[in-house]
Image (spheres, coloured by chain):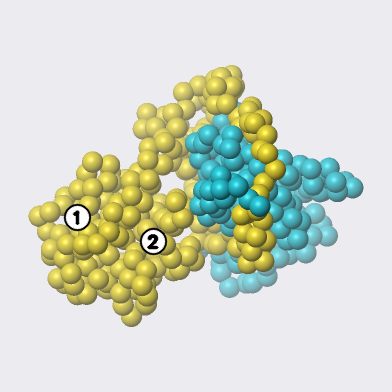
Chain colours: A cyan, B yellow
Amino acid sequence: MPANDDLQKAQRFREAALPYLDDVYTLARYLLRDASDAEDAVQECYLRALKHFDSYRGPAMKPWLFAILRNVCNAEYARRASRPSAIEDTPGAADQTPIWQENEASPETEVLRSRDAGAIRKLIDALAEPFRETFVLREINNLSYREIAEAVGAPVGTVMSRLARARAMLRAAWTAEEEHSR
Amino acid sequence: MTCDEARIMLHALLDGELDAGHAREVEAHIAGCPGCAAEFAAQREMQRALADTNLRYTAPASLRNKIEASLPKAQPQPTRRSVLRGFAMGSAVSALAATGIVAVVLRQDDQQRILSEVVSAHLRSLQAGHLIDVVSTDQHTVKPWFNGKLDVAPPVIDLTAQGFTLVGGRLDYIDARAIGAVVYKRRQHVINLFVAQTSSTEHRPPKTQTMQGFNCRRWGERGLNFWAVSDIGGDELAEFVDKFEAAMKANVEG
């Protein structure tokens, strides 16, 4: 039977950690690129977070949860026979099927044609680690540089250079694909 | 500043992570370097395109239920090992110095504090009798009411037809400054739209952040900073902001 302390702790944990479920799940989807693996990882992340909740001292809950999720995902990478293959800096291999085909917008009026979320998610998924992780933490999870540094255990300078690299690669892949579909 | 440095720093500028002095240094480099200027413009354009797209995922209800179900049970004795060990910022800061980008002053703490104040103001407003100073569903009553009370004229736009009912306006205080709050309702949920003047006329794409279970969507337009705060879902709040921005644009052009 649960002790009263445990119930109180569970309640505090619920209020502090559950509002970030979508954030944690989003990061898991981008890190693992698989819906069912992401679900398992998020569940494991919350179990571990509850276990370590007593030692949680802040400052921010979200980067703390992300740090735990990363550990879970690293175990998952190790479990997978080979690490997920990543498309390197030069995107647009010859056999890559274009994700988007449309001829309306002229390149003079619009440099980047607007995309549906699915097409952009594919471009992000194709980024190599650790650039994808840094990009997602900043652009989609809205973490500050300092919080990203905390979550991934890397210096802020490293975060900055990874982010610059990630955005350059994404931009290159985006435009390359437009050339391809033109 | 070299181009190699600028190619990294321009992202910090885009993300609003630089203090005024460093922002000026990067801007000065960009102004004198066509290559970096082109890269900056391209990256800004991509950031806007990304901000206009919902790239987040929503956790399936089954996952939420599973986690909820695992909570109230008695837990094994927690270990005292701190999972935060190794994340100390001290090492991060010294390593940053080693990269040569020595004096990046991160402004985020400020933004985090303001977000927290905005959420507190929202909470205060929900207490009985604190929500509205001027009660009206008519934008032509609410807008003039702000005259003389603020150094800025907050745009007051009736979005009743779009599903967000204008219910009134209020004066509030954020960051030790008087600020306008325009109050809307979506069903029984209150949306506070805080409006403050800013020196920047730059368009800042909307970003949603969550604090204490409230969603806050923040953006900047035409010299004004906006924060929309509510307990409605992130998607609905984004819808509100989209409708508001569209109506504001139509007002200006019409």
| Residue at position x 59%, y 34% in the image | A55
| Residue at position x 50%, y 21% in the image | B102
Secondary structure of the residue carrying tag 2 is strand
Image mark 1: chain: B
Residue lying farthest to the bottom in this orientation: B161
| Residue at position x 64%, y 64% in the image | B65
**Residue A167 visible here:** no
Question: How many marks overall?
Answer: 2
What residue is disc 2 on? B230
Q: Which mark is residue B171?
A: 1
Residue lying farthest to the right in this orientation: A81
Q: Amino acid at mark 2?
A: Ser
Q: Please, is residue B72 above or below residue B75 in the view?
A: below
Mark 2 neighbour density, 10 Å: few (under 14) some (14–19) many (20 or more): many
Q: Amino acid at mark 1?
A: Leu
| Residue at position x 49%, y 25% in the image | B1
